[in-house]
Image (tube, rainbow, N blue to C red):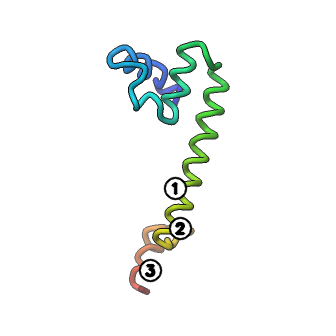
C-alpha cells in the first residue's frame, strides 16, 4: 500500500482538492496524510493502518454474519465447494 504510491497519491489529492477531502480521512489515506504533515512516522502509520483495517474487517464479518448467515468456503477448490453447496440447497 505505502510502497505502491499511497504517499504520492495522498499528497496529490490533498493539493488538488483539500486535506479535508472526506476520502483523505479514510483508512490508509488518513495515516498517510499525517505522515506527510509530520504528525506520524511511516512505521507507525503502517501499523495504525493495519490495525484499523483489521478492526474494519472484523466489523464487516460481524455484520455479515448477523445479516446473512453466510457459509464460509474452506476448501482448496472454493468454486467446486460453492457449486456443491448451491446444489445441496
Q: Residue under label 3, please give it.
A: 84
- Residue placed at 59% from the left, 34% from the top? 49
**Residue tagged 2:** 65
Q: Quadrant of residue 10?
A: top left
- Marks 3 and 2, the one that precedes in the sequence: 2
Q: Where, by quadrant of the figure, is residue 59 drawn?
A: bottom right
Nearer the camera: disc 3 or disc 1: 1
Q: Quadrant of residue 20?
A: top left
Frontmost residue, 42 versus 18:
18
Element carrying mark 1: helix
Q: Which comes before the other along the chain, label 1 or label 2? A: 1
Q: Which residue is mark 1?
A: 60
- For disc 3, the neighbor class at 10 Å (few under 14, some 14 to 19, many from 20) is few
In the image: residue 44, left or right of residue 5: right
> In the figure, 50 relative to 13: above or below?
below
Vertical position of residue 66 compared to residue 13: above or below: below
Q: CA distance from mark 3 to mark 2?
A: 21 Å
Q: Note whether 33 is above or below 48 in the view shown.
A: above
The total of numbered circles placed on residues is: 3
Q: Residues within 10 Å of mark 1 (few under 14, many from 20)?
A: few
Instruction: Give how far across and how far down residue 58 sits, in percent.
Output: 59, 54
Amino acid at each position: 500500500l505505502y510502497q505502491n504510491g499511497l504517499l504520492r497519491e495522498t499528497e496529490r489529492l490533498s493539493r488538488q482538492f483539500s486535506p479535508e477531502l472526506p476520502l483523505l480521512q479514510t483508512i490508509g489515506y488518513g495515516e498517510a496524510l499525517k505522515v506527510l504533515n509530520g504528525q506520524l512516522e511511516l512505521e507507525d502509520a503502517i501499523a495504525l493502518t493495519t490495525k484499523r483495517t483489521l478492526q474494519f474487517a472484523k466489523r464487516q464479518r460481524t455484520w455479515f454474519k448477523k445479516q446473512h448467515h453466510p457459509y464460509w468456503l474452506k476448501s482448496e477448490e472454493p468454486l467446486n465447494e460453492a457449486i456443491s453447496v448451491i446444489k445441496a440447497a
